[in-house]
Image (cartoon, helix red, strand yellow):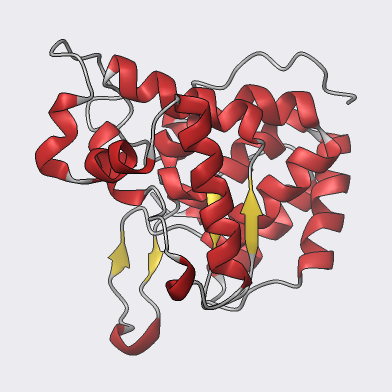
Amino acid sequence: MQAATITLAGDDILLYVRKIVQGHTIIDPYEFTSMLNVSWQQDPLGTLRLIFYLRAIDRNSEGPYKHTELQEGLGRKHEFILALKWLQKMHYSVNADSLWMVPCIGSWKDLWYDSANTGLYHYSDTSIVYPLVRSSILENHMNVHLLAKYLPKIRSRSNIKNKRHIRLNTWARGLISYLEWDELQYRRFKTAANINNFIPTNTCLSISESGKIRTFEEIKYLPFLRDLKA
């Protein structure tokens, strides 16, 4: 399903969707967040749905292998991360209720996003993310094997080359402390061969059969919004 087929209340939401399908150009962050502000005033729930749809949207591939065939679920990640930053700042309680959907619709690493290519980074509230990670490990759900894959590695002092490495190390060590692990346990968990030593034998059902949500209609697992005026 392509974004052009979405029908939502709010002229600004529709305007943004049209801009997305026009090409690969990344919209100016200030323009984007300004549009989100107006859209939220018109239709809070519709804006929230659009934010998560951005991550699952089908689009043409980019870069050296660019072609016209639509790639499922690649998403508009840059805008999605900008939207998460905006949501955490402007509507904290809604953001807190919604973060569990991020690994279902996108990727676990969207919760500790730090791009070496664009310089954009956003670490979602660790008071929510760390318990979410712990729950996934203990209950063996929400793509726990992908969680192990995408957790940032711990770098030694000699391998820390920039601020991004420092941020990722700090985040990972914070998680280790929260889980009451040591670095060896953390590294073992990240090794797929050892992951079953950390999780129970019983498994829980994913959010959907595929573990992913791809179409706008499937984004129906939104929590009731406790404070739309936050």
Given the current orientation, which residue lies at the most extreme bottom position? Answer: 64
Given the current orientation, which residue lies at the most extreme top position? Answer: 202
| Residue appearing at x 32%, y 66% in the figure | 70
Front residue (pair 156, 220): 156
29 vs 144: above or below: below
Front residue (pair 19, 190): 190
| Residue appearing at x 88%, y 46% in the figure | 38
Q: Is residue 177 visible?
A: yes
Q: In the rendered view, does 178 fall on the left or right side of 181?
A: right
Q: In the rendered view, does 107 fall on the left or right side of 161?
A: left
Q: Is residue 17 visible?
A: no
Q: What is the number of callouts on the image? A: 0
How far across and how far down the image is residue 188, in percent? 23, 41
| Residue appearing at x 65%, y 27% in the figure | 127
How far across and how far down the image is residue 155, in percent? 42, 62
132 vs 191: above or below: above
30 vs 123: above or below: below
Query: Which corner quadrant of the image does residue 63 belong to?
Result: bottom left
The C terminus lies in quadrant: top right
How far across and how far down the image is residue 173, in percent? 51, 44
| Residue appearing at x 9%, y 41% in the figure | 193
Q: In the rendered view, does 87 fall on the left or right side of 195?
A: right
Query: Which corner quadrant of the image does residue 204 belong to?
Result: top left
